[in-house]
Structures are given as C-alpha cells and as structure tokens.
Image (cartoon, rainbow, N blue to C red):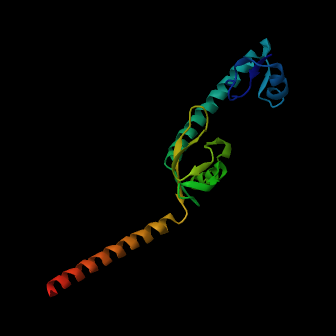
C-alpha cells in the first residue's frame, strides 16, 4: 500500500513523501491517526504544501533542540543510594528518577522514555543520553554516590589526624625518655 505522509513519522519518512508500507500498518495506524493518506495522483499538489509546512516545522524544531541540547550537556545530576562494599547498589537509580531530576533541573517535561539509560546499579559517574530525535542526542553525566560517603570521608580524615597526633606524642615521649637517660 502506498501512502502519502501528512507529517513526519519516525523511522518512516518526512511529510509530503510517498512510501510503500504494509497494508495493515497503513490502514490500521497511519491513516486513522491522521499521519498519512492513501497516495493518489490528485494529492500531489497537496503533498507540496505539506512538504513546505513540514520543512518550516523542522527548522523551528532544530533550533529548539540545539538550545535544549546545550542546556542538557551542562547538567550534572547526583544521586545518593545505599551500596555494598563492592560499589554495587542495593537498589537502582531508574530512568524515571533520572528524567524527574532532569526535568526539575531544566524546568521542562522531557518524557522518561527519551532518557536512554538502563537502571544504574553501580557507584560512580555514568553517561546518560537523551534522545530528542535522530539528529540530537545530547549526553550528560549522572553521579551515584554511596549513602553516607561524605560523612565517612570526614570521619576517616579525623581518624587519620588522631593517629598522626598519637604518633607524634609517642615520638615526643620517646625523645624525652632518651634525653632523661
């Protein structure tokens, strides 16, 4: 079945183009959703106007996606989660959580299905892709930090400092004893 696309359809083509598709796909999905019409010779004039409108929409969308891509690349999200000693999380950071935090950081509403990451199950920095369309797929970094890691670092620094002070005191005491003898 040949259809004339009224709008851009992902993985198929752009508005105003004629494509041969499976009969069921055209009859049950494209035509009822208003994405396409059955191709005929009389619709070629209509196709030219659809093509021009689609080019204008694509140009506007390209500008939007360029600015949005730059904003997304600047984002750095950080999550805190419980983890084992090997760095493996007890749970996971899901794409829905990442999308929610990204939307909060940008003040937008990007669909969670466009966030291209599997659930994060390890500590560390992870690159995450946002699929805006085929041409624009900006990447940003998500850091997963162990719960209480900042507290542990300060406690360990304090413990190291205490050990150094004790070692100095022992050294000073040994020097005093040697001088006394």
* Outermost top residue: 41
Q: Write the residue at 84% across / 29% down.
A: 32
Q: Position of residue 49 (x, y in %)?
A: 70, 23
Q: Could you say which is closer to the camera, residue 12 or residue 63? A: 12
Q: Position of residue 79 (x, y in %)?
A: 56, 57
Position above or below: 106 against 169 = above
Q: Is residue 1 left or right of residue 141?
A: right
Position above or below: 97 against 27 = below
Q: Write the residue at 53% across / 39% down.
A: 66
* Outermost front residue: 181
Based on the displayed image, in which of its 4 quarters is residue 16 positioned?
top right
Position above or below: 54 against 86 = above
Q: Is residue 90 left or right of residue 18?
A: left
Q: Could you say which is closer to the camera, residue 95 or residue 159? A: 159
Q: How many labels were placed on the picture?
A: 0
Q: Position of residue 58 (x, y in %)?
A: 61, 31
Q: Could you say which is closer to the camera, residue 178 or residue 117? A: 178
Q: Where, quadrant-wise, is the N terminus in this rendering?
A: top right
Q: Could you say which is closer to the camera, residue 102 or residue 59? A: 102
Q: Is residue 41 left or right of residue 157?
A: right
Q: Write the residue at 66% across / 28% down.
A: 54
Residue 98 at least partly seen: yes
Q: Where, quadrant-wise, is the C terminus in this rendering?
A: bottom left
Based on the displayed image, in which of its 4 quarters is residue 55 positioned?
top right
Q: Position of residue 99 (x, y in %)?
A: 63, 50
Residue 111 at least partly seen: no
Position above or below: 50 against 162 = above
Based on the displayed image, in which of its 4 quarters is residue 115 positioned?
top right
């Amino acid at each position: 079945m040949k259809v004339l696309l009224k709008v851009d359809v992902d993985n198929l083509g752009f508005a105003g183009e004629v494509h041969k598709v499976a009969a069921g796909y055209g009859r049950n999905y494209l035509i009822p959703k208003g994405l396409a019409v059955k191709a005929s010779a009389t619709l070629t004039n209509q196709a030219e106007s659809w093509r021009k409108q689609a080019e204008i929409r694509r140009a506007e969308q390209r500008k939007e996606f360029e600015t949005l891509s730059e904003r997304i690349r600047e984002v750095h999200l950080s999550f805190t989660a419980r983890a084992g000693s090997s760095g493996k999380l007890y749970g996971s950071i899901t794409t829905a959580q990442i999308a929610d935090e990204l939307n909060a950081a940008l003040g937008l509403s990007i669909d969670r299905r466009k966030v291209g990451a599997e659930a994060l199950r390890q500590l560390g920095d992870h690159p995450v892709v946002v699929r805006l369309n085929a041409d624009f797929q900006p990447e940003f970094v998500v850091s997963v930090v162990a719960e209480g890691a900042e507290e542990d670092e300060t406690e360990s620094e304090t413990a190291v400092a205490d050990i150094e002070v004790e070692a100095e005191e022992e050294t000073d005491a040994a020097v005093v004893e040697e001088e006394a003898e």
